[in-house]
Image: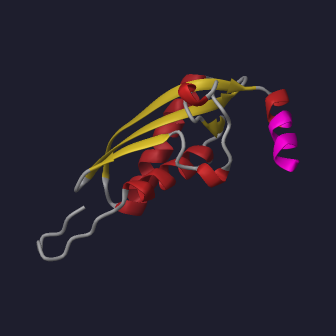
């Protein structure tokens, strides 16, 4: 992000944009969790403390591109969830940072079933 006066520059960290994107993604109906990626296991579910997992960003001076890896809830229409996810992330980042989002790419890496959620909750409780 830049201003007309070149002596005053505002820089937004990639980590900040990643965190905003991750939180906006998890608020989208139909998204069960962010995914760490296939290389770290078969679509492992992650808690909110690792919100940047499953998110990669490319931040420039005035533009950004977002790449998300998500797990959707079984029974959801994947294309509808992804469209809403793209819109939510784009609007949230543009409103909070002033950066123009040029793309929000979504990769669905898994489907969450009710049993999966119950087992994950039990592991967290232990």
Q: In which quarter of the image is residue 112?
A: top right
Residue in the picture at 59% in, 34% down: 35
Q: How many labels does the image show?
A: 0
Relative depth, front residue between 115 and 89: 115
Residue in the picture at 52% in, 48% down: 52
Q: Which quadrant of the figure contains the N terminus?
A: bottom left
* Residue 67 percent location from the top left of the image: 42, 37
Can see residue 13?
Answer: yes
* Residue 113 percent location from the top left of the image: 78, 26
In the image, 113: left or right of 83?
A: right
In the image, 90: left or right of 34?
A: left
* Residue 38 percent location from the top left of the image: 56, 25
Residue 123 highlighted magenta (yes or no): yes
In the image, 94: left or right of 41?
A: left
Residue in the picture at 44% in, 59% down: 16
In the image, 30: left or right of 64?
A: right
Can see residue 76?
Answer: no
Q: Main secondary structure of the magenta part?
A: helix
Residue in the picture at 46% in, 51% down: 18
Relative depth, front residue between 10 and 44: 44
Relative depth, front residue between 107 and 102: 107
Q: How is the model colour-coded?
A: secondary structure
Q: In this view, does 58 lie above or below 75?
A: below
* Residue 37 percent location from the top left of the image: 55, 30
Q: What stretch is highlighted in magenta?
A: 118-126
Q: Is residue 109 above or below residue 64?
A: above
Residue 86 highlighted magenta (yes or no): no
């Amino acid at each position: 992000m830049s201003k007309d006066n070149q002596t005053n520059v505002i820089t937004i960290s990639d980590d900040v944009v990643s965190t905003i994107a991750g939180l906006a993604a998890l608020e989208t109906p139909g998204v069960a969790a962010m995914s760490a990626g296939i290389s770290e296991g078969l679509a492992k579910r992650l808690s909110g403390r690792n919100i940047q997992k499953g998110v990669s960003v490319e931040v420039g001076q005035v533009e950004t591109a977002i790449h998300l890896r998500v797990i959707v809830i079984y029974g959801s229409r994947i294309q509808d969830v992804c469209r809403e996810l793209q819109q939510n992330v784009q609007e949230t980042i543009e409103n909070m940072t002033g950066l123009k989002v040029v793309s929000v790419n979504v990769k669905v890496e898994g489907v969450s079933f009710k049993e999966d959620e119950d087992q994950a909750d039990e592991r967290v409780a232990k």
